[in-house]
Image: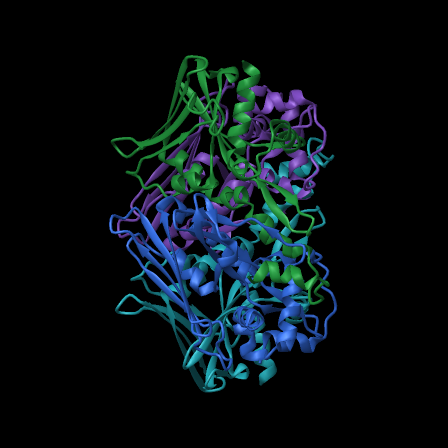
Chain colours: A green, B blue, C purple, D cyan
């Protein structure tokens, strides 16, 4: 059962690219392996009484086409990880649950005013025969007195017949860090830093020779 | 006819530099070829019922003068591409239309409040004998209920006697991504990241010898 | 006595990592030495009549685990340094006092509106037998007429039986620089620039082979 | 006469570092020469009926101390250049005047609301025997109808018995570009990108050996 869930979770990450490429599970695992090696981790963590929440940007992956073009393969996300408290300043990593915010969901978070709420729904097994069996919902709700937000994740798993809920109160200052850090990370999880960075590799004033057909494909109908 | 249009579109991209340099069409194509090779693509795409919209930053190009100075050659832009829907989740790439936002038009977009509208007009054949034959207008209008914007492109082509219109409803969250990503990209399409990046190549504390005349040209009258 | 204080101050910097790693003092000094070598300094300084204030970002340090993962070791901070005036445009560097804003405290600063106040408390000897002996408080209070803020540091040292206070009036423009510079620096003191930068080192399209167990630890339960 | 003015202008650039280092004029010219070689230029220009205005970031310079520390030598600035119009789309480069915004003046510009005004005064020959002979003032004033700003530079030169004035109307969109580009450039003209960038050069987990005295100087009293 554990193995099945792993694959589902992996599929969740790839759901958008699966829409068009129909990568099989082996392919999916393979890419994740490549992605996770030599990885740097620096989560922003908020530890509270009943649960902890951490944010970590996950970068997109790219593929080089035979034409030489490099295109986005798997989209990046802002990974939110929740852990339940099991004692004073102790949290159970084994019982963590994750929610990967897409670029547009990050856009929703960073545009929230002090009185705004947001709610996002994910189905990790979307597009598979298990669609609807696991449902995740993330909600961000302001405190009545304007001093912060409640960030909650609910995971309902019909396969395991379980329901988990994590709620972390987040102060205005902590939310400001989340917004600033997410604004910083957004172009990176979209892959735009790759696009804007490529100029440094180019030569100046001496355009390389290219098949005119490529130009046509790129710029015109 | 198609070939003529291609050149016009290319001219549109170069309209600003054409004002001063009068590059001929061969020159223009050549630069684009250099620019498009080895390119990384990571558009931010919004797929809706009747049309899709994608944003992609286009970087400026630079030229090295005989004095050693590197100056902006062709300005960058934020390329918006619209495609009509031809079925469920299917869009016709062949019928796409483009609109390249200048730095100032990007400035207009990122300074829009929730009730603001913007409208931009481009003439791809500006300054040629076909001036006024093709007119493009991009409009961004807020929903009455404040839940987002309508982003529309209209292309009227008197040569082909055609009129095309694309309208994509954009949510507040999607518009927040557009604004954040455009704010990130703006210094890059202006070439300022090149200016601020150059220091890393310089040595510290040992200024190279330079013709004093260059100093005079640079800093004084 | 001076030596003891030095160690306490060093502990303050490491207080967060001490919570989990219990690094001893030798370890702590060692890391600081590594950190401070080959260092670039470019503080933003505000010189006023009675005291001066300068801001300088302090970067986090990272450690490579045997698994190959690189994790945050010591958190970064925004170092605020206060110096008392001892004459016209002269300040006493020997009598400086420091206050290291954490990421969340930086979040508090950058989210301040024109009428907002902030106050932060630090105990450099927290978790040691000297806990409570030295107390530092930083306050940011708006001018009544909205033309700026008072930024004050108070250091009460029960060991030295001393009490020092520094107050620097900061204009709206200077505070805008502080906010913009802190927003720029925040992802860096969190280490997120390291996370987003790592992609440039990776190869595209050829994922390296990795122990599947690492994948499991990273992505699943 | 021209030569004297050139030196004065150079002094203006260095006025802040002159406060402490008393660099002589030869030194000053030398640094500028080093700075201007191999330079990349990508000004943001606004061409209007009576005058043109362009913005270009000027980076700071650094010096390596014998201790190995690299410190800020000359501060960066945001250079504003004004040129009078001498015909349709023609501007007189020979009659240009410059105004170098400091970091704090940039902070003032980027914190301006739609109804706010700013005014800055510079004396290029400050601290010399010619103090007060040349006075420059830059003002930014909002249009009455909220559609933009007037940006004006006035240069009164008592040595040449001249008074020059340049006024450029700037739209909301153009001002948004100025603010976004200045916010991007601010950490660079402060030198903070150098501070945050240095980590990439450091090794991870193996701190180099350093004189403990350096540590003491850096971190303690």
Q: For this view, does A151 lie left or right of residue C133?
A: left
Judge whether B58 appears above or below B129 on screen. above
User: Which quadrant would residue B157 be assigned to in this image?
Assistant: bottom left
Q: Is residue A141 visible?
A: yes
**Residue A15 point in image, percent of width and height:** 51, 33
Location of the N terminus of chain A (image quadrant): top right
Q: For this view, does D88 lie left or right of residue A62?
A: left
Seen from the viewer's position, the closer of residues B209 and B107 is B107
Judge whether D86 appears above or below D155 on screen. below
Residue shown at the point (25%, 51%) measured from the top left: B144
Seen from the viewer's position, the closer of residues A36 and A32 is A32
Q: For this view, does A171 lie left or right of residue D35?
A: left
Judge whether C50 appears above or below A32 on screen. below
**Residue C55 point in image, percent of width and height:** 50, 45
Seen from the viewer's position, the closer of residues A193 and C146 is A193
Q: Is residue C53 visible?
A: no
**Residue A31 point in image, percent of width and height:** 64, 32
Location of the C terminus of chain A (image quadrant): bottom right
Residue shown at the point (56%, 60%) measured from the top left: B192
Judge whether A179 appears above or below D29 on screen. above
**Residue C208 point in image, percent of width and height:** 71, 33
């Amino acid at each position: 059962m554990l193995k099945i869930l792993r694959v589902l979770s992996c599929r969740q990450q790839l759901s958008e690219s699966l829409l068009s490429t129909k990568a099989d599970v082996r392919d999916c695992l393979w890419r994740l392996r490549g992605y996770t090696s030599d990885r740097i981790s620096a989560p922003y963590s908020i530890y509270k009484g009943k649960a902890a929440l951490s944010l970590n940007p996950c970068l997109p992956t790219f593929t080089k086409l035979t034409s030489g073009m490099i295109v986005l393969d798997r989209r990046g996300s802002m990974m939110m990880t929740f852990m339940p408290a099991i004692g004073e300043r102790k949290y159970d990593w084994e019982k963590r649950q994750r929610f990967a915010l897409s670029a547009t969901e990050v856009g929703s978070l960073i545009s929230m005013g002090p009185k705004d709420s947001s709610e996002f729904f994910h189905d990790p097994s979307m597009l598979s025969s298990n669609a609807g069996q696991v449902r995740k919902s993330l909600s961000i709700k302001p405190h009545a007195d304007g001093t912060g937000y409640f960030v909650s994740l609910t995971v309902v798993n019909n396969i395991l017949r379980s329901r988990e809920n994590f709620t972390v109160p987040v102060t205005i200052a902590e939310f400001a860090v989340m917004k600033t850090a997410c604004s910083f990370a957004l172009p990176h999880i979209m892959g735009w830093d790759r696009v804007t960075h490529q100029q440094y590799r180019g030569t100046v004033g001496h355009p390389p020779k290219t098949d005119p057909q490529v130009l046509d494909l790129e710029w015109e109908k």
